[in-house]
Amino acid sequence: MRLDLIDMRLFLSVVEHGSLTQGAQAMNLALASVSERVSSMEATLGVALLERTRRGVRTTAAGDALVRHARLILGQVEQMRGELRTYAKGLKGRIRLMSNTAALAVFLPVQLRLFLEAYPDLSVDIDEHPSSEIVLAIAEGRADLGIVADIADLTALQTYLVAQDQLVVVASRSHRIGAQQYAAFADIVGEVFVGLADAALETHLSERASRLGTQMNYRVQLRSVADVGMLVEAGIGIAILSEASAAELHHPGLAVLPLSEPWASRRLYLCARDFSALTPHASLLAQQLMGGGLPPVKEAS
């Protein structure tokens, strides 16, 4: 059995576009050539990979397995090329790190400063994504390390607790809750909100709202914490932010009070497919983020 990288890229292109025609166009190949190549793959493997339908194609169980393996193999090839390019540029190592919004605000900046100061020949590529997307990317080998909130399903990964993230309510001092010591989610869920464009937090809050038989009402969602604070102070709505994000606000007209529910204290985890199988430079970053040393990690069940 022999499949090359072009076979795998071509097959993924067809699957991702749901059509032999569109997959061929994306690869700049003739339809006949793509169809012949897929048929050759099926003959070589001795199993059908695609089901042809009126609307295009869909994968068989064997095709799904090939998709998983092809993504992993191609991801490793890209990782190899990326690391070799860094040597050509005079760098001695690159680490791929994914983080949710909360960790970027609460935890990572200081840790990365310490790490990059200690290892001047290493570089870190950071991608910001929701926790659920990070978990999938780590499982598929598209990043070395991830930092996620415990709202994601972490059972397929090894994890290590690195930080806590308390959710708080930010409101104008003239708002009805402005003088309270804390807020209950059920008491504020019916309010109008100014949101921070944090998909993971939005999903988390929406799930909690649905359990109460309602939904979040966002008038606007912004990327800047400062802009959220400005609109909240003006009475446009209230906001739910991480405590670290809210600490960036210095508006005298704002009140910041913790959410009282236990789930409002989110835990941030460093995660990897296997900490013991990390590259040496990724292992060094893991040690920094864990506080030094590699303590025991929570094994996947």
Image (cartoon, rainbow, N blue to C red):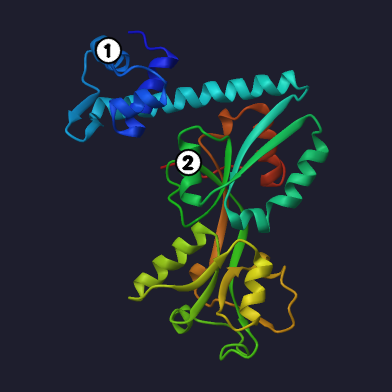
Residue farthest left in this picture = 54
137 horizontally vs 230: left or right:
left
Instruction: Classify the position of the C terminus by image quarter.
Output: top left
The residue where tag 2 is placed is: 157
State the residue at coordinates (57%, 80%): 236
Q: Are marks 2 and 1 in contact (CB under 8 Å)?
A: no
The residue carrying pointer 1 sits among few (fewer than 14), some (14 to 19) or many (20 or more) residues within 10 Å by Cα, namely few
The residue carrying pointer 2 sits among few (fewer than 14), some (14 to 19) or many (20 or more) residues within 10 Å by Cα, namely many
The numbered mark, 2 or 1, whose residue comes first in the sequence reads: 1
Residue 19 image offset from top left, x and y in percent: 28, 30
State the residue at coordinates (45%, 41%): 136
Q: Is residue 12 visible?
A: no
In space, the residues marked 2 and 1 are separated at their CA atoms by 39 Å
Q: Is residue 128 visible?
A: yes
Observer-nearest of 278 and 217? 217
Mark identifier at residue 36: 1
